[in-house]
Amino acid sequence: MKRLICLGLALLLLAPGARAWEEFDEGPWEAVPALQAVEDLPLTVPSAVLMEKETGEVLYELNVHERMAPASVTKVMTMLLVMEAAEAGRLDLEEEVTASAHAAEMGGSQIFLKEGERMTARELLKSVAVASANDAAVALAEHLAGSEEAFVARMNARAAELGMVDTVFANCTGLPTEGEHLTTAYDIALMSRELIRHEAIKEFTTIWTDTVRDGAFGIANTNKLIRFYEGATGLKTGFTAEAMYCVAATAERDGVEYIAVVLHGETSAARFESAKVLLNYAFAEYTLVSALPDEALPPVPVELGEADAAQPIPAESPRLLLRRAEAAGLTKETELAESLTAPVAAGQELGRLILRAASGEELASVPLVAAAPVPRLSWWQLFLRCLRALG
C-alpha cells in the first residue's frame, strides 16, 4: 500500500504544469530610471556631450544632435577601422605600407610622406593618433581598402552600424571638402566609445612626444590633456577654419572612463577647458557600482530533479552608474523562487536582484538564472528513489 501511495504521488508531481512557484518574467537587467542630463555646466562652446564608457550613459548634453564639421576628430573613425582590421587579422601593424601620390599630397598636419615611401602600419597609426597626420591617415586608408573613397564608404557603413544617424563622412582626415562632411557631438561620442573599447589604441593615444623614421622625425600630441590632465587616455583633437577647435577627450580613474566631446570652440583653450569641466564633473559626481550580490546566493530547491537544487547566478556582471550620494546608500535585495519543478534549463530565470537607493527607489533589476541544468527524473529513477525512501 505504501508503494502504491508513493507511486501515485510521483504521478501527480510529474503531471504537466505542476509547479511550486510563480515564474519571473525573463529579460535583460534594466536600470530604473535612466539618468537625466540636466546639469547646467559652465561651458563656452556651442555643442558638447559627456558619456560614460561602460554603460554608454549620457551625463550632460548641449546641442548634441546639431550637425557640425568635426575637422580631424574624423580620425577617430579612421583609427577605429584600423584597430578593427588589426584585431581581426586583416592588418599586421608591423607590415609595411607604401605611400601613394595622393597620400603624399595631403596638406595640414602631416609627417611629410613622400610618394613611394614605406613605413609600418604601426608608425603610421602612431602618427595619426599623436600628430593627427593626414598623409598617414590616407596611406592607411588606401592600404586597407584600395582607395580613400572605398575606405570612406566603410567609414559611413560603420557609422550606420554604430547608430551615428547624423553623420556623413567625405574623407578619412577631416580636411575641408566640397562634399558634405558632418557629424554631431553625440555621434562622435558613440565612435569614441567604440574606439576605446580597443585598449591597444591607448598605446598610441597616450603618447605625449615620440619619433618616427627611426628617430629622425619628432611628433608631439595635439591633445594637451594627455600631459596636463590626470588619467587622460586620448583621444583626438581637430581644427579647421570651419570646424574651429574640437576635441574628443577621454580619461580614466579608478576603473571608470568618461568621454567628453566638445565642438566648435572659439579657441584651443576653450575646447580643453570645456572638456576638463565635463570630465571633472563626471569624476566628482558619479561612480560605477557592481550590480552583483554581496553574498553567495542560496540554492533553490528542485522537486523531481536529478539534483536537489539549482544554483542561481547573475545573468551578467553589470555595473551601474550612480551619483556618489546614491551609491553611498545603495541596498541590494534578492528575490528567489521558493522551489522549482524539474526540468530546469541552464540560464532559466530563478529570481531577481533588486538594487535600491537609500530612499527605497528601485535603481536596477538584475536577473538571477540557473548556473547549470537540472534534468527531470525518469520514471525508473523516480521508482528507485521511492523504493530507497521506503526501504
Image: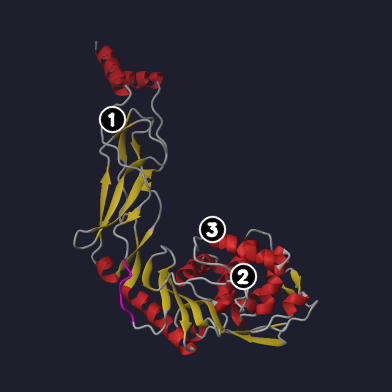
The residue tagged 2 is 170
Residue at which label 1 appears: 19
- Name the amino acid type tagged 3: Glu
Say few, some or many: other residues with alpha carbon within 10 Å of mark 3 (under 14 / 14 to 19 / 20 or more): few
- Image-quadrant location for residue 121: bottom right
Queried whether the magenta region covers residue 40, the answer comes back as yes
| Label disc, if present, on residue 1 of the rendered structure | none
Residue 161: image tag: 3
Of marks 3 and 1, the one in the foreground:
3
Mark 2 packing: few (<14 Cα in 10 Å), some, or many (20+)? many
Q: Percent x, y for residue 279?
A: 40, 78
**Mark nearer the N terminus (2 vs 3):** 3
Considering only vertical position in the picture, is 363 above or below 18?
Answer: below
Identify the image quadrant of the N terminus.
top left
Marks 2 & 3, CB-CB < 8 Å contact: no
Of residues 306 and 273, the one nearer the viewer is: 273
Say which amino acid is labelled 2: Ala
Marks 2 and 3 sit apart, C-alpha to C-alpha, by 17 Å
Q: Which segment did they paint magenta?
A: 36-41
Question: Which amino acid, by three-letter code, is at mark 1?
Answer: Arg
Q: Does residue 53 appear in this view?
A: yes
Helix, strand or loop at mark 1: loop
Label 2 residue SS: loop
Of badges 2 and 3, nearer the viewer stands 2
The image quarter in which residue 92 lies: bottom right
